[in-house]
Image (tube, grey):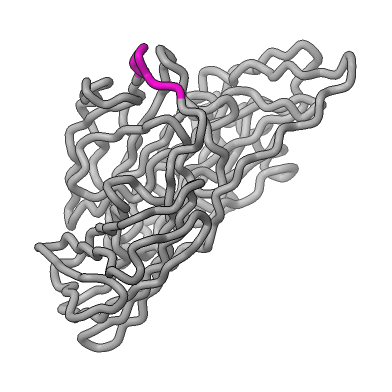
Amino acid sequence: MSRLPWPAAWTAAGTVAAALLAANIAAPPVLAGGAAGLHAVHAMRTVSPSPSPSPGADVKAPTAPGGLRACPPPPPPSGSFQGVVGLCWTASADDVGVTEYTVMLLGEDGFSPVASTSRTTAVVTGLVHGRTYTFYVVAKDAAGNTSPPSAPFSTPAISGVNVTPTPPTGDTTPPTRPTGMQADCLPDFNGTSFCWTPSTDDVEVTGYDVYRRTDTGWTRAGRDLPSTARSFTESGFNSTPGQEYVYFTAGQSYVYFVVAKDAAGNLSLPSDLVTATVPVDYPTHSPRPVGCRVEYTSWSWSGGFTSTVTITNLGQTAMNGWTLRFVLPDAGQKVVNGWSATWSQSGKDVTAAAMPWNSVIQSGASLQIGFNGSLAGANPEPTGFTLNGGTCLRG
């Protein structure tokens, strides 16, 4: 087994990166895998305002790290088949001083931290050789102020040995990246909107996730959009579970990107960034918009399954009359009968309408409904839950 040749410049850079690897790099979780399991329950909350800083306290955040790019990592130990990514970036500026950089990795459940360093280089290990990964970096100062994020950057993991790895089992081919990003494509929508050209996959694209840039990172603004989605809209608040409401400002611009995914958990490369602008006549909301949360649980057996759906009214007023819609991803999933709702199905689209005795859901209250179904194959979790036309949070 022969080692791949390493250019002289990479060898020099590897000396610095090797020390960093030993000092402060933790292995990230595996990115690919089976379809996502049941989601943990998340509650919508409003974040309490931070205490007023003491006079003279440092409240200025560092600037965003720039120029995120691939740098040569050190060669892994002889005989190692581990995938490695080396990253470099331009230092952030701060009125006092940057103390730490955090590297974030995109996975099935959004971005998560995988490295922390005081340098402007990092090595991320524990990856799959040849697979492409997406990262961004933020800077922090001693007072805990966090910078805006760098632009997302994608690069494949490399290995330092010349081997023919054992072919992985299952579907390992990611969907193609969404293209044709077009901002403000729905002119009659009073919020942000953009459209894209759909991705393709060797098996099937099962959905899309949308990410929006915030002051301190990239947050998932849209989760499990159906495979038929060609556009995304936001009407004034961040609907990601566990995040605070964020009201949009008329005339303000917001930056997004889209990622496609398949049933095996493979993620596409991110789309190009797109900047959508809130119309200048955007209305100012004083009360919170009415929201909802949906929790889905399913048990399957040979040829069938039983599912329960819990609907929670997150709004400040009672919901009088409701209709829940969602998509069963597999063509063999069929609703046979249900309870506590009037159930119907057209193709993969399922509708559950209120019964006379449970048509009102009080503010903060929950309602459980359910159905029995038949299977002709897999039993993936539904996507695209909406209640009275509005997207629900997933619990």
Would residue 120 be visible to someone looking at this image?
yes
- Answer with left or right where residue 225 lies relative to residue 104: left
Nearer to us in this view, 50 or 314: 314
Q: Residue furthest bottom?
A: 302
Nearer to us in this view, 368 or 286: 286
Query: Residue 220: percent from the left, percent from the top?
Result: 45, 40
Answer whether residue 283 is magenta in the image. yes
Work out whether 322 lies above or below 71. below
Instruction: Tally the numbered discs.
Output: 0
What residue is at 28 percent from the left and 78 percent from the top?
339
The quadrant of the rendering that contains the N terminus is bottom left
Based on the displayed image, in which of its 4 quarters is residue 179 positioned? top left
Answer whether residue 86 is magenta in the image. no
- Answer with left or right where residue 177 lies relative to residue 291: left
Based on the displayed image, in which of its 4 quarters is residue 263 positioned? bottom left
Work out whether 156 lies above or below 201. above
- Answer with left or right where residue 345 lies relative to residue 189: left
Query: Residue 222: percent from the left, percent from the top?
Result: 38, 42
What residue is at 43 percent from the left and 15 percent from the top?
252
Would residue 135 be visible to someone looking at this image?
no
Based on the displayed image, in which of its 4 quarters is residue 155 positioned? top left
Query: Residue 49: percent from the left, percent from the top?
Result: 71, 33
Work out whether 56 lies above or below 126. above
What residue is at 20 percent from the left and 70 percent from the top?
343
Q: Residue furthest right?
A: 55
Query: Residue 393: percent from the left, percent from the top?
Result: 43, 51
What residue is at 35 percent from the left and 63 percent from the top?
35
* Start-end of magenta stretch: 277-284
Magenta segment's dominant SS is: loop
